[in-house]
Image (cartoon, helix red, strand yellow):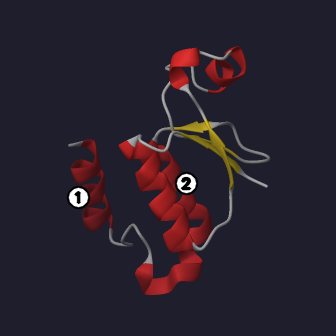
Amino acid sequence: MPTLFHHPLCPRSRFVRLALGEHGLDMRLVEEQVWDRREAFLALNPAAETPVLVCDGVPALPGAGLIAEYLDEVHGPSLGEHRLLPQPQGERIEVRRLMAW
């Protein structure tokens, strides 16, 4: 089962939890206290920031934007027109621009 390392008060973690809910996905949630700087967590994300998604067969995915794009690529087609990222390239660029802002 995929694992999401998150912190309940982290806005980026909340964003990913909402995206998981929109996709209807169940994940194992692990609350990470980033200030503890656990070596196992630092191996997943040396920046020591949440969220980090760990799935079988792919490298650890650190960061809300990267996780959102991964979820859309893997699970988005099943949502049809309700995908979180639009299909047309120009619209996807705009979503990425807004996320980076």
Q: Amino acid at mark 1?
A: Glu
Q: Secondary structure at mark 2?
A: helix
Give SS at disc 1: helix
Quadrant in the rendering for residue 61: top right
What residue is drawn where x is 50% and y is 35%? 50
Few, some or many residues within 10 Å of mark 1 (<14, 14–19, 20+): few
The residue wearing badge 1 is: 94
Image vertical order of residue 100 relative to residue 36, above or below: below
Q: Choose between 58 and 20: the one closer to the eye.
A: 20
| Residue beneath the point at 32% across and 62% down | 92
Q: Toward the viewer: 88 or 27?
A: 27
Residue tagged 2: 70
Q: Nearer the viewer, residue 85 or 40?
A: 40
For marks 1 and 2 on the same chain, the one whose residue lies earlier in the sequence: 2
- Residue in the foreground of this view, choosing between 53 and 97: 53
Q: Does 83 appear above or below 57? A: below
Dot 2 amino acid type: Tyr
Residue 75 numbered tag: none
Residue 97 pos. (x, y %): 23, 49
The residue under the point 51% across, 57% down is 17
| Residue 34 image position (x, y, % from top left) | 53, 24
